Amino acid sequence: MTREEIAESFRALQDNICLQLEIADGGAKFEEDSWLRDDPVAGAGKGGGGRSRVIRNGQVLEKGGVNFSAVYGETPQGMLQKLQLQQADFFASGVSIVMHPKSPMVPIIHMNVRYFEMSNGVWWFGGGIDLTPHYVVKAQAAWFHQQLKQVCDRHDETYYTKFKKWADDYFYIPHRKESRGVGGIFFDRLSSEEQGGKEKLFGFVQDVGKAFAPIYTHLIELNKTLSYGQEELDWQRLRRGRYVEFNLVWDKGTKFGLDTEGRTESILMSLPPLAAWEYNYSPEAGSREAQTLELLQKDINWLAL
């Protein structure tokens, strides 16, 4: 299995997901922006590139991005030090998705699948899916986690428990002491031969990617016709503010993209079109907003609810 074959699979995944999301939205179409990465050593256009696809002002999706990239070049010193790697050239490819719906009743969702290798033989896979409802519905959170468990169990029955815990720890906002959403699964630097080698791990990563569209389009159908007003929209913008805080302060993917001199517009496509911050905000006791905050914590066993 070559890195070109892996990248081509990710490229096809982007095509399929965009098609399914356009159907689910029922109005807007993705705009595509192809780009080249200028490698600081090799020169302009010599570091790979990608396809950024953004959907805006749809019937369901206010703003969303489905990005594919395949970039290569000399590994930045900062990354080598952070990951404790020896000097070598790198290649990285993947698909990254964030969807911000128009309705506060439809959840935000994020998915990423990626492959990284170096010219000295180091390689690994990473990725995951997580859900950020503006209003947590226990039954939907449980259904979401059950879908992810089914994907994991097809490959290794230990995956869900490990990767769910990883997501709980990763998608956490320490300065707020709250989770970004209801979690999901997250994994990184999977490369051990004990896990079946590259082909088996890539099969798992492919299945995670394929699960995204059916999961999210189902959640869209469940929630897109629910009524809401200004109070719910105000809450949605506050929750989007938390999303921004996590992505800009804590998210490793954002930092990796900026460290490797990736395309800024593509890296920051994860940010919502509108967000808000209100000083010292506290929801009314017993409200849906307060109930949601009570559920934004680590280590909830959603499958038992």
Image (cartoon, rainbow, N blue to C red):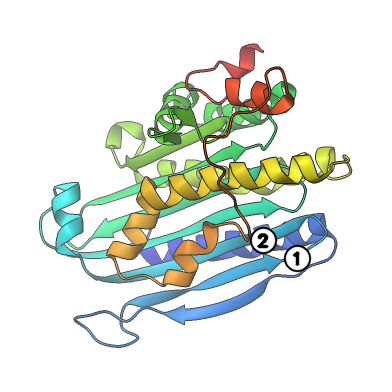
Dots 1, 2 in contact, CB < 8 A = yes
Residue 34 in the image: x percent, y percent?
52, 80
From what the image shows, is residue 221 above or below residue 4? above
Task: Judge from the rendering whether residue 51 lies leftward or rightward of residue 72; answer left or right.
Answer: right
Residue labelled with disc 1:
57
Q: Residue furthest front?
A: 279
Q: Position of residue 125 (x, y in %)?
A: 37, 47
As drawn, the label of residue 63 is 2
Estimate the x, y position of residue 231 in percent, counting from the top left: 77, 40
Residue 66 in view (yes/no): yes
Amino acid type shown at disc 1: Asn
Mark 2 residue crowding within 10 angstroms, few (<14) / some (14–19) / many (20+): many
Q: Nearer the viewer, residue 163 or 124?
A: 163
Label 2: which secondary element: strand
Comparing 236 with 276, the one in front is: 276
Q: Above or below — where is 139 with respect to 13?
A: above
Mark 1 nearby-residue class (10 Å; few <14, some 14–19, many ≥20) = some
Indicate the quadrant where residue 258 lies: bottom left
Answer left or right for 99 relative to 298: right
In this rendering, would 73 be left or right of 213?
left
Q: CA distance from mark 1 to mark 2?
A: 6 Å
The reply to whether residue 104 is in sight is: no
User: Split into 4 quadrants, where in the image is the N terminus?
Assistant: bottom left
- Helix, strand or loop under label 1: loop
Q: In the displayed structure, would residue 291 be above or below residue 305?
A: below
